[in-house]
Every structure is written in C-alpha cells, then in structure tokens.
Image (tube, rainbow, N blue to C red):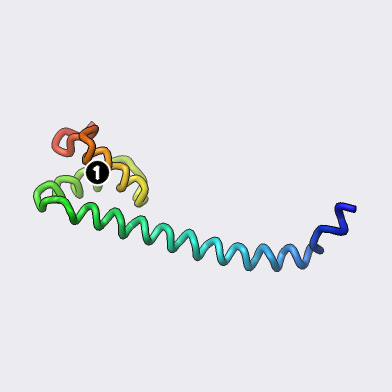
C-alpha cells in the first residue's frame, strides 16, 4: 500500500534534481538579498563609524556571512557592542 504511493527510484532522483537546483537558486537569491541589506545598513552609518565597523568586521572571528554582519550591525545599533571598544 505504501509502495503504491511512492515514486520509482528514477522518478525520485529526477524530482530531487529539479528540487535541488531550485533550492540552490533560492538560497543564492536569499544570501544576495541579505548582503545587500547588510551593505545598505553599513552605508547608512556616518563615514567615520562605517570605517570603524569595517575594520572591526575584517578583524573579527565571525564567518564572512551576511547574517553575522547584520547581527553585528544590530548589536552596535542597540548599544550591546561598542565598535570603538569591541569585545
């Protein structure tokens, strides 16, 4: 009964191939949007603070990922991280 509702191996592999490509495209688009959002927030800062944040970002142990940059910018905005005296 269960087997009747399942795809054949070849059908499933073809389905997953299409799904994988769509998923990869969606993830790349999402990551691109996150980088754009992070850059927009970064460039909205005053020039001196922006330079300080960029230096902090280059030297910090975070992965080069837009989510981490967005979090750093948020932490600075809410006062949890002082960019002039980072943790």
Label 1 residue SS: helix
Decide: is 35 above or below 86.
below
Left or right placement of residue 26 versus residue 59 in this view:
right
Location of residue 39 in the rendering, given as x and y in whole percent from the top left corner: 26, 57
Q: For the view shown, which residue lies furthest in the left direction?
A: 48
The quadrant in which residue 6 appears is: bottom right
Decide: is 15 above or below 55.
below
Task: Please name the residue shown 22% across and 52% down the image.
Answer: 42
Location of residue 20 in the rendering, given as x and y in whole percent from the top left corner: 60, 62
Task: Please name the residue shown 87% across and 59% down the image.
Answer: 4
Task: Please name the residue shown 13% across and 47% down the image.
Answer: 49
**Label 1: how many residues lie within 10 Å, few (<14), some (14-19) or many (20+)?**
few
The quadrant in which residue 16 appears is: bottom right
Task: Please name the residue shown 37% across and 60% down the image.
Answer: 33
Residue that numbered label 1 is attached to: 59
Quarter containing the C terminus? top left
Left or right placement of residue 31 versus residue 53 in this view:
right
Q: How many marks?
A: 1
Q: For the view shown, which residue lies furthest in the right direction?
A: 1
Location of residue 83 in the rendering, given as x and y in whole percent from the top left corner: 17, 39
């Amino acid at each position: 009964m269960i087997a009747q509702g399942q795809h054949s191996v070849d059908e499933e592999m073809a389905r997953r191939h299409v799904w994988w490509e769509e998923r990869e495209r969606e993830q790349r688009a999402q990551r691109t949007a996150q980088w754009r959002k992070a850059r927009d927030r970064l460039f909205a800062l005053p020039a001196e603070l922006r330079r300080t944040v960029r230096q902090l970002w280059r030297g910090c142990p975070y992965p080069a990922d837009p989510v981490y940059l967005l979090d750093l910018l948020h932490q600075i905005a809410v006062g949890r991280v002082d960019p002039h005296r980072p943790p």
